[in-house]
Image: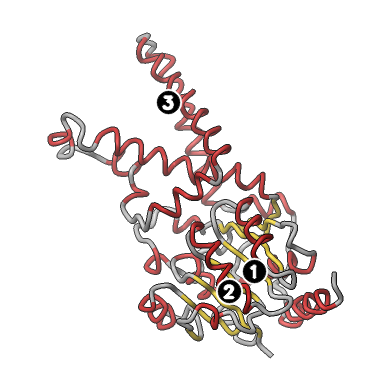
Amino acid sequence: MAIKMTIIGLGQIGASIGMALADRKDLLVRVGHDSEPTVARRAQKLGAVDQIEINLPRSVENASIVLLCIPIDQIPETLQVIAPDLKEGCVVLDTAPVKAIVARWADELLPERCYYIGLTPVVNPAYLMQEASGLDAAHPDLFRDGMMAIVSSSRSSSEAIKLAADLTRLIGATPMFFDSTEIDSLMAAIHQLPLLLAAALLNATVDQPGWVEARKVTGSPYARVTAPFQYWTGSSGVASSMVHNRQNVLRVLDNLNYYLQALRAEIEDGDQEGLAAALERASHARQTWWRQRQEANWALQELETTQELPTSSQVLGRLIGLGRRRRSGA
């Protein structure tokens, strides 16, 4: 018998996970909810979900798995709304960029009968430079050959973690395990800092003296650095994630400022050789990272694993075990 999985938020991440699970109808019934009903209906037409439910509390009724793919600032209210309707043994997952604060909310707002696991998806390198967002950027292979960071919390259990790993493999990714402190530190550097850098460049140039003429001659370097804001979907959630991860964000901003000041000093001193060396180091680092990211096999090398996809009975068994554990008071 297939189990119910509810996906809340049908943008790029939620719809792509749903699409990746489309051929597992023996295992899952995918129910989708989005705050925009037109998005939900379109996601269903694209095959991301089997059913849609416009009413949020009703969407999670009898769901064994609930996946939150929504901006982080919407998570507390969503947890409050759905908590009374979550069934015993339900596993709640989220894909927000930072985890410590979400784990805290889950601990405060989820009923004792439920579990929480954080997920941080890593996009297939083939889609790193795609020019789209939201549902338009969803693909069934968005996570194939990538990694999925699985972040446990006080509301996790070994069976819930194994279930998250099973789902990770079903969508074509490799699970890697982190604690919230570690993943939040990493996300500050590789997710949040680039957005702040792009914002700073735009705010330092647009509407500044000379911009009327400068905008006419902007080229590839400017376009590439400011690209995150081409398909911007909202500032509130991004700002919230940064404020809730402020210590890590401040640390990486200070680190960035150090290197900017070093470049400034080389320019001010007329140190052409030193400046060229710094630029060359950056070029080498970028090319090395890009090659490794395209190969996308470091997770397999580090984990040295050839684990097969979980069977339907294995996934169902984990869920049954979770329900029994809650009833026994574990």
Which mark sits nearer the N-terminus, 3 or 1? 1
Q: Nearer the viewer, residue 72 or 277?
A: 72
Q: Please tell me whether residue 309 is drawn above or below residue 23 in the rendered image.
A: above
Q: Nearer the viewer, residue 39 or 313?
A: 39
Q: Which mark is residue 279?
A: 3
Report how far apart the C-alphas of labels 2 and 1 lie in the structure.
11 Å
Foreground disc of the pair 3, 2: 2
Q: Which mark is residue 92?
A: 1
Q: Circle 2: is it few (<14), some (14-19), or many (20+) Cα within 10 Å?
A: some
Name the spot of residue 151 as percent of width and height, x first: 68, 56
Horizontally, is 263 left or right of 100 in the view?
Answer: left
Mark 1: amino acid:
Val
Q: Nearer the viewer, residue 230 or 253?
A: 253
Name the spot of residue 304 as percent of width and height, x first: 74, 54
Report how far apart the C-alphas of labels 3 and 1 lie in the structure.
45 Å
Q: Nearer the viewer, residue 64 or 137?
A: 64
Q: Label 3, secondary structure: give it.
A: helix
Q: From the image, which quarter does the N terminus lie in?
A: bottom right
Q: Please tell me whether residue 83 is drawn above or below residue 305 in the rendered image.
A: below
Which mark sits nearer the N-terminus, 2 or 1? 2
Name the spot of residue 128 as percent of width and height, x first: 44, 54
Foreground disc of the pair 2, 1: 2
- Residue occupying image coordinates x 61% and y 60%: 119
Mark 2: amino acid:
Ile
- Residue occupying image coordinates x 49% and y 62%: 74
Q: Circle 3: is it few (<14), some (14-19), or many (20+) Cα within 10 Å?
A: few
Contact, mark 2 vs mark 1 (Cβ under 8 Å): no
* Residue lying at the far top of the rendered structure: 269
Q: Label 1, secondary structure: give it.
A: strand
Contact, mark 3 vs mark 2 (Cβ under 8 Å): no
Name the residue carrying label 2: 82
- Residue occupying image coordinates x 64% and y 87%: 26
